[in-house]
Amino acid sequence: MSFQKLDELSHKLEALEHALAILGADEATHMAVGGGEKRAEAMASLAGMYHARATAPEIADWIEAAEREALNEEQAAALFEFRRHYTNLTCLPAEFVERQTGVRMRCEQLWRDLRAKNDWAGFLPALEGVLSMVREEAAMRADALGLEPYDALMEQFDPGNREAEISVVFAELKGFLKDFVPEALAAQEERLATRPLKPLSGTYPVEKQRELGLAMMAAVGFDLSHGSLSVSHHPFCGGVPTDVRITTRYRTGEFLSALMGVLHETGHALYEQNLPKAWAHWPLGKARGMAVHESQSLFVEKQIGRNPAFWRWALPVVEKHLGESWMLEDILPHVHHVERGLIRVDADEVTYPLHVILRFELERDLVGGKLEVADLPEAWDAGMRAYLGLSTIDDPADGPMQDVHWASGAFGYFPSYTLGAMMAAQQWAALVREHPSADDDLARGDFSAVNAWRRENIWSQGSRWSTQQLMERATGGELDAGYFIAHLKKRYGNP
Amino acid sequence: MSFQKLDELSHKLEALEHALAILGADEATHMAVGGGEKRAEAMASLAGMYHARATAPEIADWIEAAEREALNEEQAAALFEFRRHYTNLTCLPAEFVERQTGVRMRCEQLWRDLRAKNDWAGFLPALEGVLSMVREEAAMRADALGLEPYDALMEQFDPGNREAEISVVFAELKGFLKDFVPEALAAQEERLATRPLKPLSGTYPVEKQRELGLAMMAAVGFDLSHGSLSVSHHPFCGGVPTDVRITTRYRTGEFLSALMGVLHETGHALYEQNLPKAWAHWPLGKARGMAVHESQSLFVEKQIGRNPAFWRWALPVVEKHLGESWMLEDILPHVHHVERGLIRVDADEVTYPLHVILRFELERDLVGGKLEVADLPEAWDAGMRAYLGLSTIDDPADGPMQDVHWASGAFGYFPSYTLGAMMAAQQWAALVREHPSADDDLARGDFSAVNAWRRENIWSQGSRWSTQQLMERATGGELDAGYFIAHLKKRYGNP
């Protein structure tokens, strides 16, 4: 039976994925510094074995044959995802993938060096090389998938993302934020004029912050028997669903960035830990895509973790671990601080989408041939001026060299961040319709009903539905910027 | 060119070995407890991939062909080891290996359960099943290698080990220890009568012990940019040469067991870290075998770490980290404590060989058909009575159920421990002939000359020579129990 062969193959691929996931997490946390070169060799070799097995020509025959077999509904869904994965993996010739990997790796290495030196001129030709191959790649993917080129790129990260639809919701959000950013900043000014900011004490030992983070993780639902918290330079959620590795980094001067980072990664981790176990070795058992994944991390970080009700419960926990007592009115201005800035990863909930929309518009035009790399600094600067009133023209390191994504060839990924934020707001709204007492739950530190809703509607579904279907089934409607807009208004607007 | 094909294959195998080594070390140190089942699945699958690739029939043709190619000396040596590995891996039918793996795993699981319950009767049939397959295995290996059955088993762990030769040196050692154990115990009594034992204070926080361990590791030559120290239930040295993972476990009541454990594993680690890098992906680049490996760990733990000269330097380091000042005369009775006991892993330098010799004699007879599992408790008890004056007849958990080795099918491994102890003593003696000031070096904490000798004579040689050749080249003579005997006499005998 051909389905059986796909099932057996999946177990082998799962073992290689397991190794790659743990080796990757280990590299950023526990590996000795001198172990990097051999680790890179080993991982490249394992990735090559994975690719060779996952793209073997006979798999196409198995998929064809399995489609004529008597499958139950679950197997049929699994087969659909087998085909999707196989198509995405095989639509580029091996020779092209190899060449592209080299070009991307060199550009990424160059980026690490030249961003620090603010050297756009040195970086430009490498990024042009990457873009040229991305355009080729987009054309090949578009051809294989019957999609527009930019849509075909997004398809790797979020099956079903379409530029035409994203443009509509992003345009609505952009229109709203144009006026709302100044409004939120003015409201913040007004509040601070009434009640001056109480600064953080600045003495937060790492070990105590770690204990606080672990306590919060456990309370929010992270299963510490199937995961752990470590330290890494860039926070991430990695590992495998039975052993999810999340990380944060600590500054002893303040505790909110580490804690919010822990909550964010815990959101990713809850998704991974609660994926359907029976499907774990199939593509069907994996998370739906990057936007849904981001919706889960932002759900915990923003919808829960920055919710004033949550902080009613959280402040005694903070006091217990850090020995510092806070009034709700004094901590919220830190938790809800809004500021225009150049750096996406430092941005708050209000301004972050503008960073993403700028990148979406630019990368769409780059892929579509309407913009060339040489013109990026001006285009970036114009966008930043228009959206946030800031200029990057003298500072390409904080402009088009700010993120690693493009250097590493990841075009079509940026929209996921803000789609995730919108989905999280829409999910929270749907949850509150069913459980009007959700805020009270948070204030009591009771996450059971909230997590039960998420488990049923999101986590347990794996890749059973398209992103769009998943959202409609969970929230009763298609993606609607209105929920996120209402959320921002309520939290950051004039009272 | 066929040698080239072997070289390329080696890179692929190295990647799988890398994954297995890191996943194995991670399992015992950083893995979440609930991650075990999927980890076992993944590792079994990766081990299967390794085996399939390493035993592919075309490799035999490549080896044949390469032997007719023009190879330099290094390549010829590499080819010799390729063949040796291939023969060892392919001399058992795959069907047999699979069946045996199941039998061993079940017996090992049963052992964990039944040893705790002291249930020999329940364990007996499982061990009989393992032994029956070990006898089959030994016959097949003997056939393929042209060796005696027990020698063919040892060949996996220490190429060149021969029962006939081991029996001679073990007999000499056994004869010596028969009188020497009482002598050493009496000498210890006498010393303690003159100067009463100063007990350890019993307040040694884990973090301080860890810092002490790291300081000692670094001083002795462990490269902390290519390795790390963690905690695990059973101490081990794992990982890969560029990232050696060693572990220990801490008791806050005393600091010597953790520290000595760290020094022991550091000995293993130094060997791994200093293997020839250019050969890293070939079998030729690996450590020579378990006895030589054990000689390296015991060299650091016993020849260096329990040497009174070492403690002249070490005491101020201990004081710095633990805040406790010791006289040399007061610490040495702890470091050199001798006691007859039932448990091999708790035994001291003097009594340990008797535990090993007993196991060697029993497993040789088990494999050779002169002893049956049903008769083991009596045979074990008789040996323990004869060698150490202790009885285990009512306590099989501390008798033939004491170690995991036989349950897991590892027959032929035990001799390595004591062969290693003898080699270490012989290596130290050779080193002192070349560097008569070695003791003074230790007293100053200067390990450079000691490590230079070891690097040149042992570490850099990889698997270039047989165990016997390696010892002869390094020490000028074949393995001679006299060096170890002289060492014990000097350290533990009557003054």
Image: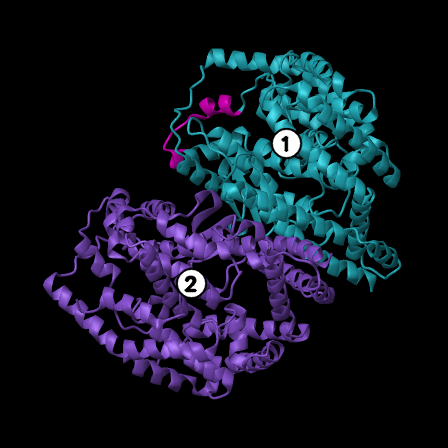
Chain colours: A purple, B cyan
Mark carried by residue A434: none
Q: Is residue A249 left or right of residue A136?
A: left
Which is more toward the observer, B314 or B22?
B22
| Amino acid marked by disc 1 | Gln
Q: Is residue A296 left or right of residue A39?
A: left
Q: Is residue A407 magenta-colored?
A: no
Q: Residues within 10 Å of mark 1 (few under 14, many from 20)?
A: few
Tell me which segment is drawn in magenta: B319-335
Which is more toward the observer, B472 or A335?
A335
Q: Which residue in the protein does label 1 denote?
A: B109
Chain label for disc 1:
B
**Image quadrant in which the C terminus of chain A is located:** bottom left
**Residue A94 percent location from the top left of the image:** 67, 72
Q: For the residue labelled by badge 2, is the local secondary structure a helix, a strand or a loop?
A: helix
Q: Quadrant of residue B75?
A: bottom right
Mark carried by residue A294: 2
- Please identify the dominant SS of the magenta region: helix
Chain label for disc 2:
A
